[in-house]
Image: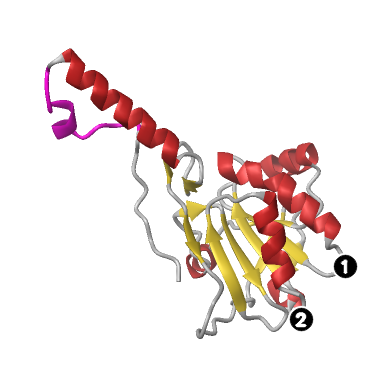
Amino acid sequence: MATEHTPRDCSKLDAEDENVSDTPRVKQWLLAGLVAAAIAGWPLACSNNRGAGTSTSDTSGPNQGKVEHAKLDYVLKDMNGREVKLADYKGKPLLINFWATYCVPCKAEIPTLVALADKYKDKLAILGVSVGDTPAELQAFAKEFRMNYPVLVSTDQDEMLEQYEAAFQIPISWFVKKDGTVYLKKLGSESPEWFDAQVRALF
């Protein structure tokens, strides 16, 4: 399934890279190459801490031959302090999106998720699990982006973040069928059309 990646801080060069050559021409080519690499890798996924660099995404395709069940025995609080049990969503297709307000690609996905929640409101449940945000930050963000699905706080939920592979990189989205089996998990951002296709595959 998902492959772990160690986020690289692209804002720093290794000491050995800085000393490749002292000639201006080589340094210019080196700088250009680094800029191109940074652009190519941004902004598909974020390290799970504020101010961290970005890294490439990893897609884990639909499960074929391997049955994995989503662990839904966690209890979290939403941004308003209400208790939410993941077990209450058993028996319905579920999309769990781990994200944060400080993560650029996460924020880019929000309008897509809002549209999906509206389009499939009678068939699909969407949960947005914030990683590292305060309830006040989430309330302001949800109001601005008109989020129409539950926004949960992951404070003191380290075990859950590890279970759902969201402890180090976000966004990561889990697509769960109504029988609780994991259809797909995706690290990094994707297009609205891609998300819609995966959701339709859950029905």
Q: Residue at x 18, y 14 (%)?
A: 24
Q: Which residue is mark 2?
A: 91
Q: Quadrant of the N terminus?
A: bottom left
Magenta run includes residue 170: no
Up/down of 9 relative to 112, above or below: above
Q: Is residue 34 left or right of residue 154?
A: left
Name the amino acid, label 1: Asp
| Residue 150 makes an appearance in the image | yes
Display coloring = secondary structure
Q: Nearer the viewer, residue 115 or 92?
A: 115
Q: Nearer the viewer, mark 2 or mark 1?
A: 1
Position of residue 107 in the picture relative to residue 48 (left or right):
right
* Residue extending farthest right: 122
Q: Earlier in the sequence, mark 2 or mark 1?
A: 2
Quarter of image, res 86: bottom right
Residue at image location 45% in from the left, 66% down from the top: 2
Vertical side of 15 occupied by 61: above or below: below
Q: Residue at x 74, y 73 (%)?
A: 93
Q: Position of residue 77 (x, y in %)?
A: 70, 60
Query: What kind of residue is marked 2?
Result: Gly
Magenta stretch in the rendered image: 11-22
Q: SS of the residue at dot 2? A: loop
Pointer 1: what residue? 122
The percent coordinates of residue 28 (x first, y second) are 25, 19
Mark 2 near mark 1, Cβ–Cβ under 8 Å?
A: no
Where's the C terminus, which quadrant? bottom right
Q: Is residue 134 visible?
A: no
Is residue 18 on the magenta stretch?
yes
| SS under mark 1 | loop
